[in-house]
Each structure stands twice: as C-alpha cells, then as structure tokens.
Amino acid sequence: MAAASAIAEFQKLFEATTKADAQRLASQLVLDARQFGDLITIANGLGFTHELVTKQWAPDFAARVPAIMDQIVAGSKSEDPKVKKKGAAGFNLINQLFIQRKLLFSHFFVRDIEWHVFYFSGEDYFGAHFDHPHVHYASHLWNHDLATVKAELQKKDFRFSTTHLQVIPFSD
C-alpha cells in the first residue's frame, strides 16, 4: 500500500462512527511500519495530536544487571569452577530478563473528545503470542474514556477489548 493510500485508510478508520465500523476497517488494514511512521508525521495536519507513551516492566533483579554482567565476564575468564558456575548462573539470569521483561509502546492520536490508540509490545510485534505480528487498536468508540485507557496501559496485566491490525515489520 502506498503512503498516500495508507493515510487514506487511516483517515477512514479515524472517521468511523461506530465501533463495528472501526473494528471492520481496522481488521482489514495491513500496517507497514514505515506507513505508520508517516501517519505520526502528518497527525497534526489531520487535526490530531500524537503522543507516544512507553512503559517497561522488568523483574526485580534487572537493577543488578551491571553486577551480573561482571559475574558473567569473571566466569568466562576464570579457571575456578565456582566462579565459572556463578558466571553461568548470571548468564541464565540475563536470559530470564529477556523473557520476563515487557516493553509497551502506545501511540495516541487525540482530537477534542476523539482518540485512537495503537499499542504493541515485543510479543505482539514479533508474533510470540499470535500467528502474525500485530498492533492493538481501540478508540473512543469503545466507550472508554482516554484517562482510563492511559491508566490501564500503565498496568502490566491490563485488559480491555481491542482489534488487531496485522503488521509488516521493518525490512531492508
């Protein structure tokens, strides 16, 4: 889909007047990551303010990463079995960090009382919990107020209904 065509599709989505229409239009979109960047760039020209909100959740031991990395390096250089074992344990913790950490990106487009949100985490983008990369979409048509949605997205295990848009990730 060409950039102009993609923007026209987003405009249709933003102009939907019922949740059912928004869900139908959103589910038909296949989002190219670069085209989404184009939407962000011209949001003001469409009358919307764009706001990016990020949130990260990490296990408690994430604060110890520098010390854990030192432990891994020491283990890789040492002949002492106890130091090597500590190094291996540190490596396992780093693996757990990547598994347990969650980073969420939420893109809000707001105009007066109208709002639209597209959000995703690494699990969404890399297809870890669904059969294809996707972003979540919801809007004011879902009968949630914007402040409540923003508050929900700050919780690790937030829940509210959305529609998936299939994503074509960045590629060379």
Image (tube, rainbow, N blue to C red):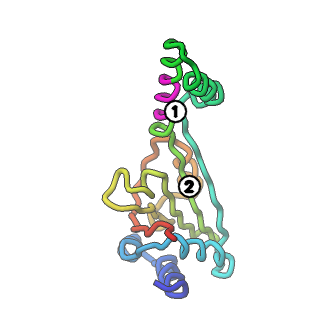
Crowd rating for badge 1 (residues with CA inside 10 Å; few <14, some 14–19, many 20+) = some
Q: Nearer the viewer, mark 1 or mark 2?
A: 1
Where residue 26 sits in the image (x, y, percent)? 41, 72
> Is residue 83 depicted above or below 67 in this figure?
above
**Circle on res. 105:** 2
In the picture of the structure, the residue carrying the numbered disc 1 is 94
Where residue 106 sits in the image (x, y, percent)? 56, 57
Q: In which quadrant of the rendered image does the N terminus lie?
A: bottom left
The kind of residue tagged 2 is Phe
Q: Residue at x 56, y 45 (%)?
A: 154
Q: Residue at x 54, y 76 (%)?
A: 35
Which residue ends up furthest to the front in the rendered image? Answer: 79
Crowd rating for badge 2 (residues with CA inside 10 Å; few <14, some 14–19, many 20+) = some
> Is residue 78 depicted above or below 18 in this figure?
above
> Is residue 35 depicted above or below 96 in this figure?
below
Q: What secondary structure characterizes most of the magenta part?
A: helix
User: Does the stretch in magenta take in 93?
Assistant: yes
- The foreground one among 71 and 56 is 71
Q: Residue at x 48, y 18 (%)?
A: 85
Q: Which residues are magenta?
A: 88-96
- The foreground one among 113 and 138 is 138
Label 1's element?
helix
- The foreground one among 97 and 50 is 97
Label 2's element?
strand
